[in-house]
Image (cartoon, grey):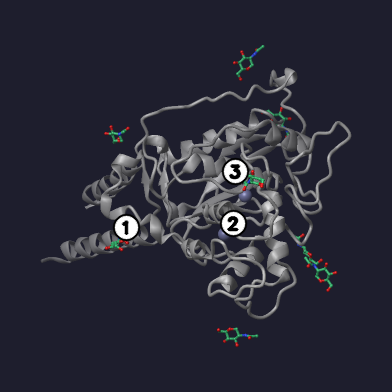
Amino acid sequence: MNIHNKFTTIIIIILTLSIFTTLTTSFPHFFPNISSIPPSLIPNTTSGAWDSFNKLSGCRPGQKLEGIAKLKNYFHYFGYIGNFTGNFTDDFDDVLESAVKNYQRNFNLNATGELDESTVKQILKPRCGVPDIVNGSSTMNSGKAASIEGTVAHYSFFPGRPQWPPRRRNLTYAFEPQNQLSTDVKLVFANAFARWSEWTPLTFTETSNYRASDLKIGFYSGDHGDGEPFDGVLGTLAHAFAPPAGLLHLDIDETWIINDVMASGSSSAMDLESVAVHEIGHLLGLGHSSVENAIMFPTISSGVRKVELDRDDVEGIQVLYGTNPDGNGTTGPSFGEREVNGGTRGILGLVQVLFLAIGLILYVF
Ligand SMILES: *[C@@H]1O[C@H](CO)[C@@H](O)[C@H](O)[C@H]1NC(C)=O
Ligand SMILES: *[C@@H]1O[C@H](CO)[C@@H](O)[C@H](O)[C@H]1NC(C)=O
Ligand SMILES: *[C@@H]1O[C@H](CO)[C@@H](O)[C@H](O)[C@H]1NC(C)=O
Ligand SMILES: *[C@@H]1O[C@H](CO)[C@@H](O)[C@H](O)[C@H]1NC(C)=O
Ligand SMILES: *[C@@H]1O[C@H](CO)[C@@H](O)[C@H](O)[C@H]1NC(C)=O
Ligand SMILES: *[C@@H]1O[C@H](CO)[C@@H](O)[C@H](O)[C@H]1NC(C)=O
Ligand SMILES: *[C@@H]1O[C@H](CO)[C@@H](O)[C@H](O)[C@H]1NC(C)=O
Ligand SMILES: *[C@@H]1O[C@H](CO)[C@@H](O)[C@H](O)[C@H]1NC(C)=O
Ligand SMILES: [Zn+2]
Ligand SMILES: [Zn+2]
């Protein structure tokens, strides 16, 4: 073997290794639809991050039960228990009771303060990692008074109402280069952005300059450096930061479906566009809403596709940015069901990347 051949072999080994390292460490799973997921890759739906809360069903104030401490952590994480230092106990105390009541108000449940079946069912649903109550200032339902007309606005903003300043209406977005997302996956985000630009003066343009982009989108696993670690399958799905941070993070461990999530009823498959539309709302300054049909409602079940802005979302975003000057929405939005179908194939993009890389190596040497 001459020097040149040795060199070629080494380069091929290094490239192969680096491709596979990238695949195993930072490449999310995407599937066009539920039937295309290999059974071995379908996580047990009984292994979701919060399944242990099931056994707390029926629990009342005054009781002590193993697992209550973990539930207090849950409520602490989402802003229902504030000011805490130290470890939580397994006592169903006043603090937890008041947290449960606020939670029930926000999610349109009877505010009993007890962990009844419908409350536990709601708690278990996969959701956004952004808190419902930020810094003790109440958003969503709890603490909201009816307006003069008798209607209640349910959309909310982050404390201090952060928003993109008037000179920044044309925003750029980019994808975490390490994720190596296919064009099919990028198209999902383009569609999600379009749902917000339709009703506002904002425009969104993809750029390949990740560092300089206004909005940065990436898939990450577990602790990824911003103090908000992801929790594996289900549990929290994604989170995004208020303006002008521009960070949108998704949990790499979810089974993301980029087309046709409704083909199956029972599984842990999550619809990527539904979650993307919600998180973009946060990037623009919206908090959570208690309107169940609103995009900004905090939870979404697996197998569900919800991508249309609700009137509540549009009213909220237009408080921040006004209407789309090019739009025809002066008579108010009609919020019908619109389903978009296209033959997208995420996994094929990955195969193409591999073949391109191999082709390049063969060509160079
Ligand atoms: C799922 O996707 C695969 C691959 O794109 C396709 O062959 C199959 O027909 C799809 N199944 C359904 C139910 O849409
Ligand atoms: C799902 O659960 C079953 C039984 O508990 C187990 O045998 C199987 O290995 C699990 N599958 C995965 C992907 O964890
Ligand atoms: C909290 O719990 C951890 C582990 O269970 C323990 O190491 C730590 O000392 C506890 N802290 C307090 C303030 O009780
Ligand atoms: C709330 O309470 C009423 C009356 O007790 C009951 O009819 C209703 O089903 C309850 N709603 C929920 C979501 O539990
Ligand atoms: C929460 O309050 C603290 C202290 O008042 C402040 O430093 C922090 O910036 C606030 N966080 C948000 C998100 O408003
Ligand atoms: C935190 O503690 C301060 C003073 O102890 C209190 O005024 C404030 O309401 C508390 N905030 C929450 C969210 O409990
Ligand atoms: C955004 O771009 C459009 C043209 O595409 C331009 O008319 C508009 O002035 C720009 N807005 C800002 C705030 O730069
Ligand atoms: C307004 O736009 C929608 C699509 O966004 C279109 O279906 C509708 O015909 C338009 N209406 C008018 C009056 O142009
Ligand atoms: Zn959210
Ligand atoms: Zn993050």
Please name the residue that numbered disc 2 is placed on: 116
Which residue type does callout 1 highlight? Ile
Residue at the spot x=10%, y=66% of the render?
Answer: 1
| Disc 1/disc 3 C-alpha distance (Å) | 32 Å
- Mark 2 C-beta to ligand 4 under 8 Å: yes
Between circles 1 and 3, the one closer to the viewer is 3
| Disc 2/disc 1 C-alpha distance (Å) | 49 Å
Which residue type does callout 2 highlight? Asp
Disc 1: CA contacts within 10 A as few (<14), some (14-19) or many (>=20): some
Which is nearer the N-term, disc 3 or disc 2?
Answer: 2
Badge 1 marks a residue whose secondary structure is helix
Relative vertical location of residue 312 with respect to residue 215 in this rendering, above or below: above
- Mark 3 C-beta to ligand 9 under 8 Å: yes
Residue 60: x and y in percent read: 63, 66
Between circles 3 and 2, the one closer to the viewer is 2
Please name the residue that numbered disc 1 is placed on: 19
Asked whether the beta carbons under mark 3 and mark 2 sit within 8 Å of each other, the answer is no
Q: Nearer the viewer, residue 135 or 241?
A: 135
User: Which label was assigned to residue 278?
Assistant: 3
Residue at the spot x=53%, y=36% of the render?
Answer: 306
Which residue type does callout 3 highlight? His
91 vs 135, left or right, is left
